């Protein structure tokens, strides 16, 4: 018995039966039934339906569900081929790889065909702590504290004489065993997807999987092009000086900071004592004034404090409170006026200096922040675009082949690619005509109803299956696998030799393939 397993891509979920290529009873299934037959008995179809979210976790769950279904086919000694479109192809690849890593090679998997499939390149996050769930992180902290405690105990034994030799030896030599056990528990508590990183795919498995892989993709596939762009994109949302204006506002607090610092050094009582030598002055003790009045007195003292130095200069020239040149309060008023102007000028100059230093700091800080934020923005764009939601894993890029394969596929032959492009262009022109006649409706539609105007044949990425000769190429590829063969009707089809030539051309691509089975 031969089975064809079909896996849809992102956003294509729904009931098992329906008109879409991956659904039971679709035009694609009917075509394959007319073009193919199983060597031993009837041809069967399996339809793997998953949530279709752009999510690494969703794809991993779909791959595990597919792997379980393939195990059932293996137990029945049943030949099967897998067919995945878009991220459905990466689901197929993950299922095959995970099965091999878990020691369950799928012997009856005769061929896996991927159509317009982007393969997400991921890597495990460096620290174990970042790969754990909250309860695991709590355990990691407990492990780290225990390790530090044991290390401190071991060091203390080296520096001092043991007073409990038996107990100390138990702790000293038993501690590493306990720590190793705890660490293994932490490793095991990582998500299953991340744990699989620790299992290396054998060369034999790589060779086997590669020999059965047949990628099909259009050189102008929009989805593949967009996801490839994510790697090369240089996101610069933040200019180097974007934060300078905001950070420069820090200079507004320069005067209050200076005033506070100086008020700790010179206070109202000190100034009043100096002025009291010139005029009668009897200030209220600080302990008897309120906080607001104390603040005001100290602030005024800071501003007017240069008056003290002016009075000292007058005294140096012989002008004293008791000299004949003294005019009492008039001279003191002049000194206070000049001293206050000097104090304000000093504070102004200090504020200018601080403002310049703040701007200099702001430029360096803004440059560093722009570098960090641009990297974070690029990472976030990459994460959202590639569906990177797996704990302990970072998505890097999308490629047209899995990273464990040492080669790349070849785009569809130019004449077949032209047919797909023409179908997509014709559908786009029709959609544009409908949109133009309904522009008012589209302008007012706020619930996504504008998508009703699209058949999704407007994109190359979703047009593959609507081209008859592409469907025949897929059928021919499956027919070359053990357990399957072309029907007489297909062999007599005028396009049979054409798709055979396409198959030969694609088989000669940089990925070394040999007929499986």
Image: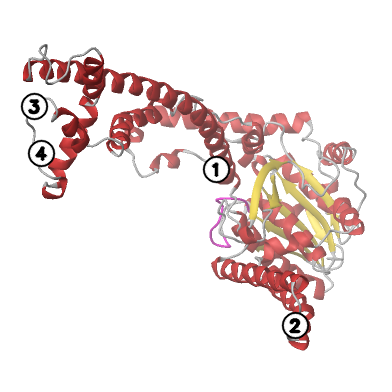
Magenta part of the protein: which range?
8-17
| Mark sitting on residue 168 | 2
Image height of 136 relative to 29, above or below:
below
Q: Nearer the viewer, mark 1 or mark 3?
A: 3
Q: Is residue 260 magenta?
A: no
Q: Residue at x 81, y 64 (%)?
A: 101
> Could you tell me if the residues under marks 2 and 3 are in contact, i.e. CB atoms within 8 Å?
no
Q: Quadrant of the N terminus?
A: bottom right
Residue closest to the far bottom: 166
Tell me if 262 is positioned left or right of 84 in this view.
Answer: left
Give 449 or 267, whichever is nearer the viewer.
Answer: 267
Q: Is residue 24 visible?
A: no
State the separation of the CA atoms marked 3 and 4.
Answer: 12 Å
Q: Which residue is tagged 3?
A: 279
Is residue 270 among what the camera can see?
A: yes
Which label was assigned to residue 180? none
Q: CA distance from mark 2 to mark 3?
A: 79 Å
> For the residues marked 4 and 2, what is the alpha-carbon distance in whole angstroms?
70 Å
Mark 4 or mark 1: which comes first in sequence? 4
Prevailing secondary structure of the magenta residues: loop
Local crowd size for mark 3, using a 10 Å CA cut-off: few (<14), some (14–19), many (≥20): few
Q: Nearer the viewer, mark 4 or mark 2?
A: 4
Q: Determine the CA span between mark 4 and mark 1.
A: 64 Å
Query: Circle 4 — which element?
Result: loop
> Is disc 1 placed on a helix, strand or loop?
helix
Camera-nearest residue between 227 and 361: 361
Q: Position of residue 412 (x, y in %)?
A: 77, 35
**Residue shown at 18%/14% (left/top)?**
319
Q: Nearer the viewer, residue 56 or 34?
A: 56
- Vertical placement of residue 172 versus 436, above or below: below
| Disc 4: which residue | 283
**Which mark, by number, is residue 380?**
1
């Amino acid at each position: 018995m031969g089975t064809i397993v079909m896996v849809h891509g992102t956003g294509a979920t729904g009931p098992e039966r329906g008109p879409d290529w991956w659904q039971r009873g679709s035009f694609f299934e009917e075509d394959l039934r007319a073009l193919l037959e199983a060597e031993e008995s009837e041809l069967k179809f399996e339809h793997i339906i998953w949530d279709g979210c752009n999510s690494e976790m969703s794809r991993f769950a779909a791959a595990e569900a597919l792997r379980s279904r393939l195990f059932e086919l293996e137990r029945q000694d049943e030949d099967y081929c897998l067919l995945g479109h878009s991220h459905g192809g990466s689901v197929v690849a993950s299922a095959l790889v995970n099965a091999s890593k878990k020691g369950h090679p799928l012997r009856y998997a005769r061929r896996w065909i991927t159509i317009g499939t982007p393969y997400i390149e991921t890597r495990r996050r460096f620290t174990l702590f970042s790969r754990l769930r909250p309860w695991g992180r709590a355990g990691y902290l407990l492990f780290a504290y225990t390790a530090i405690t044991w290390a401190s105990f071991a060091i203390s034994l080296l520096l001092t004489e043991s007073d409990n030799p038996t107990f100390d030896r138990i702790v000293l030599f038993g501690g590493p065993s306990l720590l190793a056990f705890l660490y293994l528990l932490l490793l095991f508590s990582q998500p299953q997807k991340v744990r699989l990183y620790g299992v290396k795919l054998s060369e034999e498995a790589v060779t086997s999987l590669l020999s059965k892989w047949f990628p099909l993709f259009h050189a102008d596939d929009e989805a593949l092009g967009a996801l490839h762009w994510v790697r090369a994109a240089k996101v610069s949302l933040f200019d180097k000086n974007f934060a300078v204006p905001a950070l420069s506002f820090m200079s507004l607090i320069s005067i209050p900071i200076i005033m506070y610092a100086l008020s700790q050094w010179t206070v109202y009582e000190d100034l009043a004592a100096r002025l009291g030598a010139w005029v009668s002055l009897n200030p209220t003790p600080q302990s008897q004034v309120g906080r607001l009045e104390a603040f005001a007195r100290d602030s005024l003292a800071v501003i007017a404090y240069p008056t003290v130095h002016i009075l000292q200069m007058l005294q140096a020239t012989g002008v004293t409170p008791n000299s004949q040149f003294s005019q009492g309060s008039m001279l003191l008023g002049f000194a206070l006026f000049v001293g206050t102007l000097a104090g304000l000028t000093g504070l102004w100059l200090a504020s200018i200096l601080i403002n310049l230093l703040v701007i200099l700091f702001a430029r360096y800080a803004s440059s560093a922040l722009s570098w960090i934020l641009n990297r974070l923005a690029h990472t976030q764009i990459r994460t959202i675009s590639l569906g990177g939601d797996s704990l302990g894993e970072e998505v890097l890029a999308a490629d047209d082949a899995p990273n464990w394969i040492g080669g790349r596929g070849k785009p569809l032959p130019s004449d077949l690619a032209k047919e797909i492009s023409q179908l997509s262009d014709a559908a786009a022109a029709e959609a544009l005509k409908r949109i133009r006649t309904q522009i008012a409706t589209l302008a007012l539609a706020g619930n996504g109803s504008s998508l009703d105007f699209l058949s999704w044949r407007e994109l190359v990425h979703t047009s593959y299956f609507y081209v008859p000769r592409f469907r025949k190429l897929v059928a021919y590829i499956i027919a070359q696998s053990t357990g399957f063969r072309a029907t007489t009707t297909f062999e007599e089809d005028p396009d049979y030799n054409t798709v055979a030539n396409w198959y030969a051309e694609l088989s000669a691509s940089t990925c070394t393939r040999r007929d499986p089975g």
